[in-house]
Amino acid sequence: MINIKENERLEMLNHSCAHLLAQAVQHLYPQAKFWVGPAIEEGFYYDIDLGDEVIKEEDLERIEKEMKKCAKDGKKIIRHELSKEEALEKFKDDPYKIDLISRMDENETVISCYSQGDFTDLCRGPHVETTKEIKYFKLLKFSGAYWKGDSKNKMLQRIYGVCFDNQEDLDNCLKEIAEAKERDHRKIGKEQEIFMSHELVGSGMPMWLPNGALIRKQLENYIYEKEQKQGYLHVYTPCVGTVDLYKTSGHWDHYKENMFPMMKVDEEEFVLRPMNCPHHMLIYGNKLHSYRDLPIRIGEFATDFRYEASGAVKGLERVRCMCQNDAHLFVRPDQIGEEFQKVVRLILDVYEDFGIKNYKFRLSLRDPEDKEKYFDDDKMWDEAEAKLREVLNGLGVDYFEAVGEAAFYGPKLDVEVKPAVGPEVTLSTCQLDFLLPRRFELNYIDSNGEKQIPVVLHRAIFGTFDRFTAFLIEETKGVFPTWLSPVQASVIPVNPELHQEYAEEVRDLLLANNVRVELDARNEKLGYRLRETQTRKIPYTIILGDQEKDNKTISYRLFGQKDTTTVSQEEFVKLICDEIKNRSLRKND
Ligand code: TSB
Ligand code: ZN
């Protein structure tokens, strides 16, 4: 998908198109007041106060028509400069513009406006020369958006659109948007009955349906095996903790706005936990440790609750109740490099197993100026950041650095992926932490019998099962590898009257070999039943007729393919079971 912000001409054109949108809206809704209308990566938007009016789907077309009319007039887009006083006077009836002007920098003595015909907007520019240039555009969607993004403020109407220099580019972009909508995990998740939401459970609280639960269980088994092989110790802990626990960890001071409010039970003050680190710190502290015992890797598939803004929650990707594939690795300072390297290798290994190629490593560092967010120990930060860089360079992986994105307790490596719709999100993460072990007074006994403080690596390979599943749905477009498919094979007797018995024999054989199989002996046409295996994206369709029955063979088709292969029962069982056991990617990928 093209990034409008990376192309100066397109950025200017989209910004001008936002003004054209505002001009059209002003014609159609004389009460309209305008907040801001920037160009964004996907095009542009404008936030508009329409009084009590709420934009509806059919309004977009009407506004678009008016925009075309305004553009045709071919009015020149003219820049005027005003002093701050003049600007305040000119826009005195518009509280939004007054707000913008009064917040402008002291040094900004000249304020610019752009006019096109009967419409003037406060704006830094630049813009195209005439509205005639704004020809190939489309309004895409609308949503509510709180003024300044604050839910205490008024909800404005946000209208999105995109603009290009020619029809072909616009068509391509619209095609990509349509494809992305098809891939959206919320759409596929519904069609394939993976998850559902219900207002009685609450927003950001999806429920995993049997198909989704099955996929999640496979993911759990997969990563559990990998972690066991690397010596992780898995635990179960409660999804609540006391306020004091989170005061000890520092989350109460640094993370409170992301937490659900406190609840009182008897004399104890509880919170739903947003993170599992404090519980794992206590588990480490439950025993004495020698330097020889380290690293100690405590893992958990742990449920967490976070307050995410209602406008931000999204399907399984951004939820308020999530399950992390979490672990905390307690290491000696001399083991940081090796342990961090192991985590990065595990991430690479897992992504390869899933065929995931579209991701970026982001090394998140502190902002040395921000003494409030980050604990104040420059030496520790510098050493930690250098260590992570050294490992990444040693492994030869590509990464970019992001200043100011570190957690309050240390620098981290994040894996960034782009969902079908919306901005990039973090999947895997590995975070170095010098602070929590101190706060929990953790230690180990070194070779001289002295107490030393361990370092902790927080890491989540899948991130959460929720977000990883959302991403996997979009990556695969719902065509999961056989080992993850809720139904792995569908057995279809050509004529149920003649072939049902043999079909049942084949189904039972596969069931006995732990294949998730269904028998479709419904009294429906063969073509109809075959089509259904395709819409349900079932990996193997087994078609059994006279020949198969007489020869005790199996004829199968892979999802998305027309040709049929015939093999013996033994061969088929081996073929499908090997594919499942090896967790192979789809053959036709
Ligand atoms: C890795 N304490 C660490 C842990 O030990 C931690 O909680 N890190 S985190 O805050 O980055 O969260 C871990 C992962 O959870 C993120 O990388 C991201 O993939 C996932 N995640 C975070 N917020 C959400 C959410 N609202 N919905 C779904 N997944 C989320
Ligand atoms: Zn943690």
Image (tube, rainbow, N blue to C red):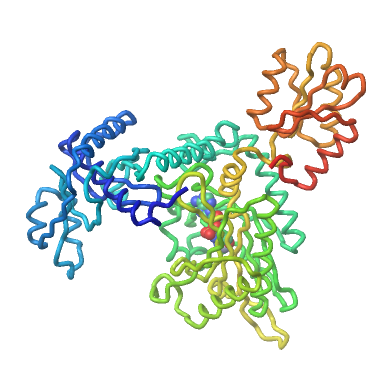
On the image, the x and y values in percent for residue 459 come to 61, 62
Give the camera-side residue of 483 and 589: 589
Does residue 497 lie above or below 113 as drawn? above
Quarter containing ligand 2? bottom right
- Tell me which residue sits at (61%, 74%) in the image: 455
The quadrant of the picture occupied by the C terminus is: top right
Q: Quadrant of residue 457?
A: bottom right
Picture residue at 84% right of the left edge, 39% below the top: 575
The residue nearer to you, when weighing 429 against 374, is 429
Q: Dividing the picture into quarters, in which one does residue 403 lie?
A: bottom left
Residue under the image location 90 percent in, 34 percent down:
570
Q: For this view, does 27 lie left or right of residue 308?
A: left
Give residue 226's quadrant in the image.
bottom right
Give the image location of residue 278, x and y in percent: 56, 64
Picture coordinates of residue 486, whole percent (x, y): 69, 35
Q: Is residue 344 left or right of residue 251?
A: right
Residue 240 in view in this figure: no
Q: Residue furthest right?
A: 551
